[in-house]
Structures are given as C-alpha cells and as structure tokens.
Image (tube, rainbow, N blue to C red):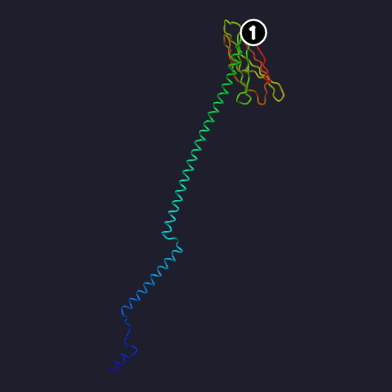
C-alpha cells in the first residue's frame, strides 16, 4: 500500500509543483519606475511624432490667428478708406453731371429764346405801316421750316388789312406746294380739297397770324409755296414764296 502511494507521488500522474522566485520590494519598485519612465518617454515620443503629421500646436495656431486678425483689420481699414474716396468722387461726378445738365438746359432755353426773339422781330417788322398805295388784304410774311418728323414742314403766315378797316375780314387760306420727286414736278394742296372741315379759316380786323404743318411724300423736295387768301369763293390776294 505504501509502495503504491510512493509510486503515485513520484509518477507522471503526480501533482505539479510551481517554484517562484521571490524579489525584494525595492527591486520591484525600481523595475516599476523604469517601466513607467519608458512608457512616459514612449508617450512623449508618440505625441511629438503625431504633431509632425497633425500640424502646428495650439500656440502656433493662436499666433497665426492673431496675425490673420491684424491683417484683416488692415484690409478693412483700407477698404473703408477706398470706399470713402470712391464716394467722394461719385458725389463730385454727380455734381458735375447735374451742372452739365443745367448748363445744357440753359443753352437750350437761350436758343429757344433767340428763335422766339427772331420771330418776334420779324413779326414786328411786318407790322410796319404798309405802303401808302397798298389797299385791301396783304400777305406781310410767310416762312417755312423743317419740323421734327421726316418730310414734315411747318409754315407761319401773317395777313394784314391795310389802311383803317371798318369791319372784320372772314375768309380762308389755301396753300399750293410745288415739289419734285424723282425728278418729276408735283403739287400738293393744303388743306386737302376733299376734307372741307380742315379749312384754314381767317377772321380778323387788322392782322392775324396762322401756323400749321404739312407733310410731303417720301423723297420729295419742296420748291415753292403759293399762298392764296380766299373769301366768298374768290381769291382776294395771292403770292408765291420760293423755298430753294
């Protein structure tokens, strides 16, 4: 029995025994410190290595942000300064443009006034006393000038009764415009005989001014105008005015 127990303890099936070496605690603390230092150094190395690939640190980013902010402030100041200069120039341009427009209006008004004065001078000259041997109805002046629209002409007529008339004259004005078109002569009746309602009526004691327009065909050139004053179907006076 004892022999069997001895063989069991010494055989393959016997329980295993682990032998552990027991280190003193100062040595274990020293080894732990070395491991911790190695781990810290590895952590620092990994951090620095990561900074090389991840970019600048917080301090560098802060300095760069401050630099960019300063540059932005300078650019805003330059923009405000340039904008103020541009606003000043724009105001000056507006003032100059307004002055030019006002000057153009003044020039136009002066030209209109000059034309009116010339017409008034011509009118008053036509009011000079008629010759002593003049009798009846007189055509004192007749003028024709181009109007704004193409082929349109404006006429101005002044008719006067000579002497000391004791009653009003009532009648009509008829114009016969002679013109050429493509080298051929033509005439135009103003107003059109087919439209009696467009008659140019006269009714005055001493004088009367008549103004109107007529339009020639495309490409026509006016040569002369025959002015006829009619009363009761009879021509009282007439006169031809050349235009060329």
Mark 1 residue crowding within 10 angstroms, few (<14) / some (14–19) / many (20+): few
Residue 40 vertical position relative to residue 13 in the rendered view, above or below: above
Residue 153 vertical position relative to residue 39 in the rendered view, above or below: above
Q: Is residue 134 left or right of residue 80?
A: right
Residue at 64 percent across and 8 percent down: it is 131
Q: Is residue 14 left or right of residue 235?
A: left
The percent position of residue 19, horizontal first and vertical second, equals 33, 84
The percent position of residue 227, horizontal first and vertical second, equals 65, 15
Residue 193 vertical position relative to residue 92 in the rendered view, above or below: above
Residue 12 versus residue 137: which sits nearer the camera? 137
Q: Which residue is mark 1?
A: 131
Residue 153 vertical position relative to residue 36 in the rendered view, above or below: above
Q: Quadrant of residue 164?
A: top right
Residue 18 versus residue 184: which sits nearer the camera? 18
The percent position of residue 174, horizontal first and vertical second, equals 63, 15
Q: Quadrant of residue 155?
A: top right
Q: Is residue 31 left or right of residue 181?
A: left
Count of numbered labels shown in the rendering: 1
Q: Quadrant of residue 218?
A: top right
The percent position of residue 7, horizontal first and vertical second, equals 31, 92
Question: What element does badge 1 sit on?
Answer: loop
**Residue located farthest toward the left when viewing the structure as drawn:** 1
Residue 101 versus residue 134: which sits nearer the camera? 101
């Amino acid at each position: 029995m004892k022999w069997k127990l001895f063989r069991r303890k010494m055989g393959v099936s016997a329980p295993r025994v682990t032998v552990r070496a027991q280190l003193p605690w100062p040595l274990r603390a020293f080894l732990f410190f070395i491991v911790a230092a190695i781990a810290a150094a590895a952590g620092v190395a990994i951090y620095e290595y990561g900074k090389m690939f991840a970019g600048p640190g917080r301090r560098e980013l802060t300095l760069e942000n401050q630099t960019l902010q300063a540059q932005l402030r300078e650019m805003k100041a330059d923009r405000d300064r340039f904008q103020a200069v541009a606003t000043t120039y724009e105001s000056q341009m507006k003032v100059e443009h307004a002055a030019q427009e006002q000057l153009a209006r003044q020039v136009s008004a002066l030209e209109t006034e000059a034309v009116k004065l010339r017409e008034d001078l011509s009118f008053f000259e036509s009011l000079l006393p008629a010759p002593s041997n003049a009798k009846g109805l007189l055509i004192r002046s007749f003028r024709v000038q181009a109007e704004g629209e193409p082929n349109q002409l404006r006429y101005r007529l002044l008719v006067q009764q000579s002497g000391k008339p004791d009653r009003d004259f009532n009648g009509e004005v008829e114009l016969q415009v002679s013109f050429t078109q493509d080298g051929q002569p033509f005439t135009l009746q103003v107003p059109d005989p087919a439209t009696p309602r467009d008659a140019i009526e006269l009714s005055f004691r001493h004088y009367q001014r008549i103004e109107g327009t007529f339009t020639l065909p495309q490409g026509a050139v006016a040569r002369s105008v025959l002015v006829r004053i009619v009363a009761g179907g009879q021509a009282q006076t007439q006169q031809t005015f050349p235009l060329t």
